[in-house]
Image (tube, grey):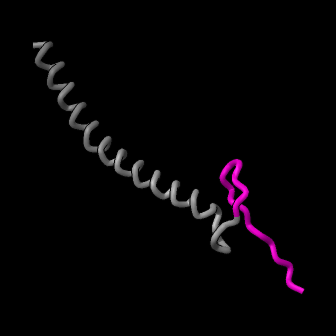
Amino acid sequence: MKKTTVKKCKYPKCHKETYKKHGIFCLEHSRKIKDNSKKTGEVLVAVTVAVPIALTTATNIIKQIKK
């Protein structure tokens, strides 16, 4: 006889089954994690663009003050 095991979601306090054999999270939590990763990626892109601009502006202002 085959030994069947039910894979449970690894999210804290969640006892649902995973929807794929190799899945780690249940469908609800995998969607939440996917959405959060998209938002995090967008924020990282914005920060990557904004920080160098802010640094160059700050250095230019400091140079003008020292003159």
Asked whether 2 falls inside the magenta stretch, the response is: yes
Q: Quadrant of residue 38?
A: bottom left
Asked whether 66 or 50 is in front, the reply is 50
Q: Residue at x 58, y 64 (%)?
A: 27
Residue, far top: 66
Asked whether 45 or 10 is in front, the reply is 10
- Give percent across and percent down for residue 36: 46, 51
Numbered-mark total: 0
What stretch of residues is rendered in magenta? Answer: 1-16
Left or right: residue 39 versus residue 61 is right
Image quadrant where one finds the N terminus: bottom right
Left or right: residue 29 versus residue 48 is right
Q: Quadrant of residue 59?
A: top left
Residue, far right: 1
- Give percent across and percent down for residue 20: 63, 73
Asked whether 11 falls inside the magenta stretch, the response is: yes
Q: Residue at x 80, y 72 (%)?
A: 5
- Give percent across and percent down for residue 32: 52, 54
Asked whether 57 or 7 is in front, the reply is 7
Image quadrant where one finds the C terminus: top left
Left or right: residue 19 versus residue 61 is right
Q: Quadrant of residue 58?
A: top left
Asked whether 3 or 59 is in front, the reply is 3
Residue, far bottom: 1
